[in-house]
Image (spheres, rainbow, N blue to C red):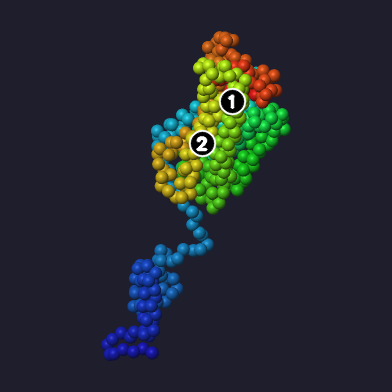
Amino acid sequence: MMRGGPGQPQDSSPAVPALLRLLGRASLGLGCSSCAAPLRRASRSPAGLLLLLLGGPSSPPAACLPPSPAMPAGPPPPPATPLLAWERVLVLLSCALSALGAGLLVATHALWPELRTRARRLLLYLSLADLLSAAAYFYGALRDFGGPSWDCVAQGALSTFANTSSFFWTVALALYLYLTLVRGGASAAGPGLLGLFHAVSWGVPLGITVAAVVLKKIGYDASDVSVGWCWIDLRAEDRVLWMLLGGKLWEILAYVILPVFYILIRKHINRAHAALSEYRPILSSTPAFQPRTSIADKKLILIPVIFIFLRIWSTIRFVLTLCGSPAVQNPLLVVLHGVGNTFQGGANCIMFVLCTRVVRNKLFSCLCCRRDDSLEPSLPGSESRRQIHAAFPKDWDSQDSEWDRVEFSST
């Protein structure tokens, strides 16, 4: 029913403006002020209300409408840790030195057959893993990925496989030396053990890497758990599990296993040295033969210490990433992580080439293009190898002969 005084325009039913006012207050309550204007315009006439309801020109703007649940937005890419130019140069230099050191270890194995003992064969496989790891890290740091790509996945897969394999071979070398020197000589570490080392140290990393690639877990990690290269995708829901399987679990286990094995080996050598000194009381009391910190003692301490020092920065950044701490982007921590993860091959070269007299003298003789037999002491003989727990060579007090015995104890 239409009501109004004389000369006044007829208005619509009172229910219509009331309905519009209710809709306008609801739109303002949702925080969309632009929706109230078309509703107010629509209240001027019933035709405007009809256009509004039919979705005409007076309909609310699209910004006021709720997002469609059919098209959920994906997780945004994580903010990247900036990699400065000087940081990249240091990481690339570390990769190059590591590749050079690993290549030198491979070359010494190829050039001199007399050095091809079982211990050094394990070192050869460790060097091959370090060589692959250094090459993958070099490409990743040089490329400095800014997002997911096919070569990011390829580089991440290669570095995951090589790095995890390096952990296994490092522990395998320590286990072999322990079994050979402490648990009964070469008979305790027969050929079957070497096959087991191959199956575990190559097979387990390969299986983990293939599974990670197939399930699309390897990708861009924003340099929070790397230094320019790709590893586990930080947008994966189960990224922590794959970070552990892809390296961190084996890295943390190596922190515990390596010190235990090398401490036990060192104690065994010290006990044998003390037992030998009982049969040589005159020499033991002579100042020239006073016990000194031997090369073997130093190496048995330095090997786990150097490994932990190089790798601990990666573990620290892993923990900081899980905690969401901004300290993960600290430049010093980034450099220590980059150099520590990439210099394993160089550290092994220093320990097992430059600090091993037999190999060092052969290398220097080869580089100087001359042969000096006086610089090449013979390796421990087969008789001393068979009697590794019963007797020691006469030059046991030599600083180098102890480590030669540890490293060249069996062929």
* 154 left or right, relative to 87: right
Residue that carries the numbered disc 2 in the rendered image = 308
Q: Which residue is mark 1?
A: 274
Horizontal and vertical percent for residue 21?
36, 78
Q: Which percent across, then down, holds residue 371?
A: 57, 9
Mark 2 lies on a secondary structure that is helix
Picture layout, residue 130 above or below residue 279:
below
Q: Is residue 208 above or below residue 274?
A: below
Which one is nearer the viewer's eye here, 345 or 1?
345
* Amino acid at circle 2: Ile
- Say which of 174 and 325 sits in front: 174
Q: Which mark is residue 388?
A: none
| Quadrant of the image occupied by residue 387 | top right
**Image location of residue 15, percent across then percent down:** 39, 84
Q: Residue at x 52, y 30 (%)?
A: 302
Q: Is residue 271 above or below residue 73?
A: above
Q: Residues within 10 Å of mark 1 (few under 14, many from 20)?
A: few
Query: Could you give the CA–CA distance between mark 2 and mark 1, rounded to whole angstroms?
Result: 30 Å
Q: Residue at x 56, y 17 (%)?
A: 283
Residue 166 visible at all: no
- Which quadrant would the N terminus be assigned to in this image? bottom left
The picture quadrant where one finds residue 84 is: top left
User: Mark 1 belongs to which amino acid?
Assistant: Ala
Tell me which numbered mark, 2 or 1, is placed earlier along the sequence.
Answer: 1
Residue depicted at 56% across the width and 12% down the height = 375
What residue lies at 58% left-to-right and 31% top-to-bottom? 267
User: Are there few (<14), some (14-19), or many (20+) residues within 10 Å of tag 2?
Assistant: many
